[in-house]
Amino acid sequence: MERSLRAARVATYVYFVLYGTLLGTWVVHIPEIEERTGVSHATLGGLLVVLGLGAFVGMQVAGPLTDRLGARTVAPAGGVLCGTTLFLPGLAHDPWTLAAALLVFGLCNGCLDVSMNAHAVHVEKAYGRPVMSGFHATFSVGGVLAALAGAGAASAGLNPAAAMAAMGAMGVVVALVAARGLLPAAPAGETAGAAEEAGTAPPAEGGGSTGRVWTLAVLALMVMLCEGAANDWSALHLKDVMGASAGAAAFAYGAFAAAMTVGRLLADRIAARFGSLAILRNGAAVAAVGITLVTIGPSMWAVFTGWALFGLGLSGCVPQLFSAAGHADPSAAGTNVSRVAGLGYVGMLAGPAVIGWLTHLVALDHAFVLLTLLCVTTAVGAGVLRTGSSVVRRGGPAVDPARRAETAAGRR
């Protein structure tokens, strides 16, 4: 059993890296595709919303499918679909064909995103300790691989369609090979029995469980809105407000991204010792301090420190929210994760736009006060993680879910 559980964890890491690589491959080819299709920056912004809309719809479809068929079926299918549709944006020749390509690619991304996170929840439950943040950290590894592959394709003279098709084909192979390590799906009754045996079943509270999941989704929206704002406005803030050069300004996002990656690598151990509530509440508080330092920082180094604290604080929040949603009802993990991930994704897309709209009313650094308020609200609302049973047995041994189900059945 220990070997199969380790294989499932490795397979989940592979899917997170795969997702980051496929999505990153599209990102690194955006400039070439933008030039090929002749779209403006403003039009491209609207087309990215189409990508997000497709992902949102894909998440809502994949969640119930994952609960019904199992992540072992849906995650490989999502990986194959992402791989086979990755080249479509590279073939686009005008805004309309690019919009259609991004809608299809977004749908497939949403399917992979939800199913792999649902499987990560099952792996975490089997381990009996937090492991979700580590999975999310490896998503960034995929982005690095995509950047390296993109640079190699450019030096080799490959056009975007050919380069993206090659990466997509590799992604299909990886998705199919890694599928062998995924945990088998258990019938809903067995899943519930296993959760009861392990002491992790949620209380029978009817609609209360659904209400709690939507509360988690709202928190995810706020946290991911902050993350989206940092992605698009950190470098511009340093350049426009602090007067830094373009090269120096890029380090603002670098400080944020690096701190977020480090934080996610450490968050599982911290959660195992102090609990998910501590990660969410204290992380949001640290993020609030960080973005406040960005707003009022007297020097460039203070602003760098602020962006780093902002990334460090946010780093563990989303994994804890996804994990709590998946564990709220073991028989509906996919559906609940799709709700939280879907609303969070809306926040990720809305973040840059909301800050941009506020800059028409106030200065950019003053617009960041909204992010401070959202972080403070998240810290206050973190108590939702205290309701229901514990997500996992902290520091408990890994137990075979099938064995727990059999034991529960024997007792009945």
Image: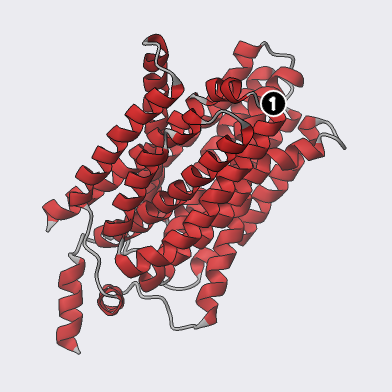
- Pick whichever, 351 or 104, lies toward us: 104
User: x%, y% of residue 210?
Assistant: 53, 74
Residue at x-position 71% and y-position 31%: 42
- Pick whichever, 265 or 361, lies toward us: 361
Quarter in which the C terminus is drawn? bottom left
Q: How many marks?
A: 1
- Amino acid at circle 1: Ser
Q: Can residue 395 be seen in this snapshot?
A: no
322 relative to 216 in the view: left or right: left
Residue carrying label 1: 40
Quarter in which the N terminus is drawn? bottom left
Few, some or many residues within 10 Å of mark 1 (<14, 14–19, 20+): few
Color encoding of the figure:
secondary structure
Residue at x-position 42% and y-position 50%: 113
Residue at x-position 28% and y-position 33%: 170
* Badge 1 element: loop
Residue at x-position 41% and y-position 20%: 150
User: x%, y% of residue 317?
Assistant: 51, 49
User: x%, y% of residue 3?
Assistant: 12, 51
